[in-house]
Image: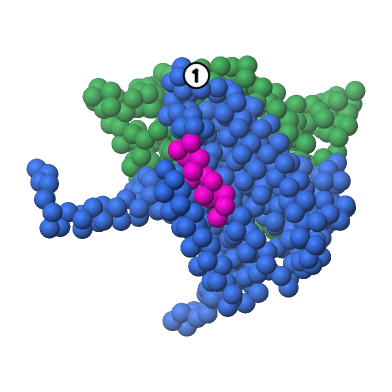
Amino acid sequence: MTSRLTIRVLGALLAFAVLARIPAGFDVGFKFDAALAVIWAFGLLSLVLLTGYVGQISLCQATFAGVGAYTAGMMVSSFHVDYLVAVAAGVIAAAALGVIVGLPALRLRGITLAIVTLGIALVFDRYVFQDHAFEWFTGGTGGWRVSQATMFGLRMDSSAHLMAAYLVLLGLFCVVAVLLVNLHESGAGRRFRAIRDSELAAATMGVNLTRYKLLAFGMSAAIAGLGGSFYPLVAGSVSPQPFWLFTSLQFAAIAVLMGVRYVPAAALGGAFMAFVPDVLTRYGHGAFLGHAYEISYDWFQIAVGVLLIGQLIALPDGVWGDLRGRVRHAWSAAGSVGGRRVKVA
Amino acid sequence: MATFAAYTVIGLSLGGIFSLAALGIVLIYRTTGVLNFAHGAMGMFSTFVAWQVFYGWSHPFWPGWVSTLLAVVAGLIFAAAMGLLLELSVFRWVRGREPVVKAVITIGILLALQSAASLIWHNNQYHLPIYILPQQWVLSVAGVPIGANSLVIIGAALGLAFGLGAFLRYTGFGRAMRAVSDSPTSASLWGVPVGRVGAVSWMLGSLVAALAGILITPFINFDTTSLTLLIIDALAAALIGGLVSLPLTVLGGFILGLLETYPAIWIQSIGFPRLVALIVIIAVLFVRNPRGFSVAAK
């Protein structure tokens, strides 16, 4: 067990070392995308826990991220606290909302839970994040502007210190990722998976459904909120648009597309979600056979929808799950060369 | 009292909108077992096709009703074709999968259609609605104005509820549709042409979505997201009908329409009605045992 933990920690350190260097040569736009990729990856990671481990559907993960973002923005703009305090507040607020959202999930399952969480995402999108009644929380129509903040007592300007924000985000992501992989085989993780496979059976074996479902929703929302609460630092402001309903739907779609049971798939999905639209809009225009063309952001969402449908028909375990399966298959096939071949008739 | 009556009229026409949208969801759910999150998006896309014919391609010398008729027919033909295409390219291949997987597939359809529409017709741009009857036709009952288009919506909702209900219950093809949704294997063993039934189910569902979308345009901010997001209110109405009963769904739509309209007397907010819809959804799911619609709860 311990050796596995060591391997995982080493793997995370290696991933951190590699990923930390990649955006160094990027321009500001792509550095922003790199930080955004980690924020979205947190959102997808929250679904790995909630859907992949515990089997609960949620279509409001962007809402949790948005609550984290608005709380952090409010803390920094109104109370001028250190950014770490703002992040902690964002995580706590998101986790609290997650537990509240988990309450209906105690009775609901599957599609009915999808309907309720979709409704919650819409209520926050159209009402809480946009209505005058919540201006104390959202900072009015302009949102919170966080152009200057301090972290660990150091100045963090959103434009100048993108790399620093990216490194902090990436470090946190690696830590949370290792914790999640370990959770899978812990006592709580076994209870989570029991709930996923059959709630009735889990309850019969003495799993406290109320406690573990609420715990799962709280933890998942906290993870999404952790990413979201860095959004004001990275983007310099908070607005409802990044956390609207369609982001929640994209989270669900991309998490399933990449493989909702696998932690590395979340990182892959985050990069996909942040870089692909920007690359498309940046390089996707020109002339082809004399016809001027332009690829807009809309093509990205069309691609997500079409890829999701294709994946669900052809690769039920997601892109990462399928790749992993193929690599393992090839590995064991390579291992059997020279050894005793097992004939499968 | 006059305010109350006026709001009641608004609420009822809003309820007619929700009912129309919800009927299609219940129809598709009953005949295919798929809870279609993309229902609003499908209706939206067909409605934009009708809009394109009405405002883009119709000739100025044609009388108004010809343009309207052509637009509606074009929208409905497109809707049927889209339903058929979706069945052939997507849902035929996932017939045996769990309901949740099919629901997630409809989310993919929602995302793709929504972006395709905003790519073609541009979002955040006000589109003129399609008026089935002239906007000036307004009835006045005891001093309360009632638009003719509101009456069309309410009439269409009631007519569709009972018409589709009778179709599913009393015709052979309707019964075949319900049989396929219940168990494709058993239905095919009894000689039901499962593929053809699935195709007709999706074409019919898409038609109802398009009809609802076209009738709704004068009453909402007609852009690519509004009709897509109508799904939540429609789902609330559909849940009141237990995802089974078409007349109860229409009743649920009217109740929801009134519940969302009356608070507007005191609370001026665009977002507040969404909260009402969410509360209705949660309340319905808690009062009715989710096992009541067992396929959804699996």
- Quarter of the image where one finds residue A108: top right
Comparing A145 with B158, the one in front is A145
Give the residue number, with chain letter if any, for mark 1: A206
Q: Is residue A295 magenta?
A: no
Comparing B96 with B121, the one in front is B96
- Mark count: 1
Q: Where's residue B109, x and y in %?
A: 49, 47
Comparing B224 with A4, the one in front is A4
Residue B96 seen in the current view: yes
Q: Is residue A181 magenta?
A: yes
Above or below residue A121? Residue A149 is: below
Q: Residue furthest bottom?
A: A290
Q: Residue furthest right?
A: B1
Question: Which residue appears at 46% of the width and 57% of the height?
Answer: A11
| SS state under label 1 | loop
Q: Where's residue B154, x and y in %?
A: 66, 29
Comparing A198 with B135, the one in front is A198
Above or below residue A281? Residue B205 is: above
Q: Quadrant of the N terminus of chain A?
A: top left
Query: The chain coloured green carries which letter?
Result: B
Name the amino acid type tagged 1.
Gly
Q: Where's residue A291, x and y in %?
A: 49, 79
Q: Main secondary structure of the magenta part?
A: helix
Question: Which residue appears at 83% of the width and 43% of the height?
Answer: A134
Q: Colour of chain A?
A: blue
Determine whether, in the image, residue A73 is placed left or right of residue B233.
right
- Quarter of the image where one finds residue B60: bottom right
Question: Which residue appears at 38% of the width and 46% of the height?
Answer: A317
Q: Where's residue B234, x and y in %?
A: 61, 33
Q: Which residues are magenta?
A: A174-186
Question: Which residue appears at 57% of the width and 38% of the height?
Answer: A58
Q: Quadrant of the C terminus of chain A?
A: top left
